[in-house]
Image (cartoon, grey):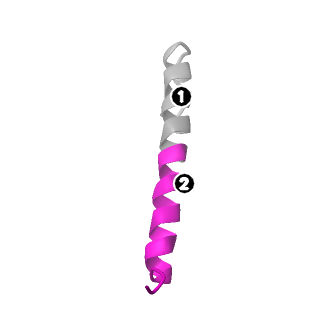
Amino acid sequence: MREPHTWQRALAIFEEFSDRRAARLREMLRGLDAQPPLAGW
């Protein structure tokens, strides 16, 4: 069985990374809810 194409592997890694990043962003935004909005947002 051939191993997956490089771009498929990269896509899987990127999706996992962006999932983790999105979770961190949600945590940050939840924390910002209790604070006054930042300038420029």
Along the line of sight, the residue nearer the viewer: 12 or 27: 12
Q: Where residue 17 is drawn, which disc sits there?
A: 2
Q: Where residue 27 is drawn, which disc sits there?
A: 1
Quarter that holds the N terminus? bottom left
Amino acid type of the residue tagged 2 in the rendering:
Phe
Place of residue 3 in the rendered image (x, y in percent of width and height, measured from the top left): 48, 82
Instruction: Tell me where the magenta segment starts and ends, as one range.
Output: 1-20
Q: Is residue 15 above or below residue 2?
A: above
Task: Please state which of the two labelled residues, at mark 1 or mark 2, is closer to the viewer.
Answer: 2
Amino acid type of the residue tagged 1 in the rendering:
Glu
Place of residue 26 in the rendered image (x, y in percent of width and height, measured from the top left): 48, 32
Of all residues shown, which one is farthest toward the bottom? Answer: 2
Q: Is residue 12 above or below residue 36?
A: below
Along the line of sight, the residue nearer the viewer: 1 or 17: 1
Q: Is residue 30 magenta?
A: no
Q: Give the Cα distance between marks 1 and 2.
A: 16 Å
Q: Earlier in the sequence, mark 1 or mark 2?
A: 2
* Numbered disc 1: secondary structure: helix
Place of residue 17 in the rendered image (x, y in percent of width and height, measured from the top left): 54, 54
Place of residue 21 in the rendered image (x, y in percent of width and height, measured from the top left): 54, 45
Of all residues shown, which one is farthest toward the front? Answer: 1
Q: Residues within 10 Å of mark 1 (few under 14, many from 20)?
A: few
* Numbered disc 2: secondary structure: helix
Q: At x 51% / y 72%, what residue is drawn?
A: 10
Marks 1 and 2 in Cβ contact (< 8 Å): no
Q: Is residue 23 above or below residue 27?
A: below
